[in-house]
Image (tube, rainbow, N blue to C red):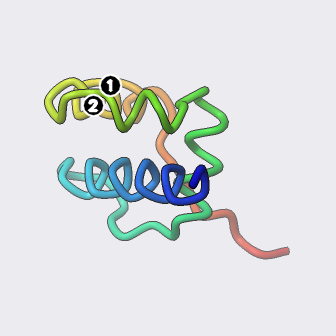
């Protein structure tokens, strides 16, 4: 059950990021998951937050630290 909750949280964060202009769109889920871990974003917090609150949190975090796709070495 936790896997489904985590996937739902990653999807919600991904959709929120995609709704912000000027941000890389359609990032892979692993990039979103790593970014969530770096910023201490918990799946339960994402799933319980109202959409407007989630949007404002994600937008403020992105201003400081935008998720990036790391280039393969």
| In this picture, residue 8 sits left or right of residue 1 | left
Instruction: Say which element carries label 2.
Output: helix
The image position of residue 71, as x and y in percent, is 70, 70
Q: Is residue 19 above or below residue 45?
A: below
Q: Residue at x 58, y 44 (%)?
A: 35
Q: Is residue 73 above or below residue 54?
A: below
Q: Residue at x 58, y 29 (%)?
A: 39
Foreground residue among 33 and 59:
33
Which residue in the protein does label 1 denote? 57
Label 2 crowd (10 A; few <14 / some 14-19 / many >=20): some
Instruction: Say which element carries label 1.
Output: helix
The image position of residue 31, as x and y in percent, is 58, 59
| In this picture, residue 50 sits left or right of residue 72 | left
| In this picture, residue 9 sits left or right of residue 48 | right
Q: Residue furthest front?
A: 1
Foreground residue among 20 and 16:
16
Q: Is residue 64 above or below residue 34?
A: above
Foreground residue among 51 and 67:
51
| In this picture, residue 35 sits left or right of residue 16 | right
- The label on residue 54 is 2
**Residue at mark 1 to residue at mark 2: CA–CA distance:** 5 Å
Q: Residue furthest bottom?
A: 72
């Amino acid at each position: 059950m936790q896997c489904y909750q985590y996937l739902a949280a990653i999807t919600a964060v991904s959709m929120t990021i995609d709704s912000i202009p000027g941000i890389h769109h359609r990032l892979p889920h692993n990039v979103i998951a790593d970014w969530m871990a770096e910023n201490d974003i918990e799946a339960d917090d994402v799933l319980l937050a109202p959409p407007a609150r989630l949007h404002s949190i994600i937008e403020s975090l992105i201003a400081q630290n935008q998720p990036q796709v790391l280039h393969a070495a």
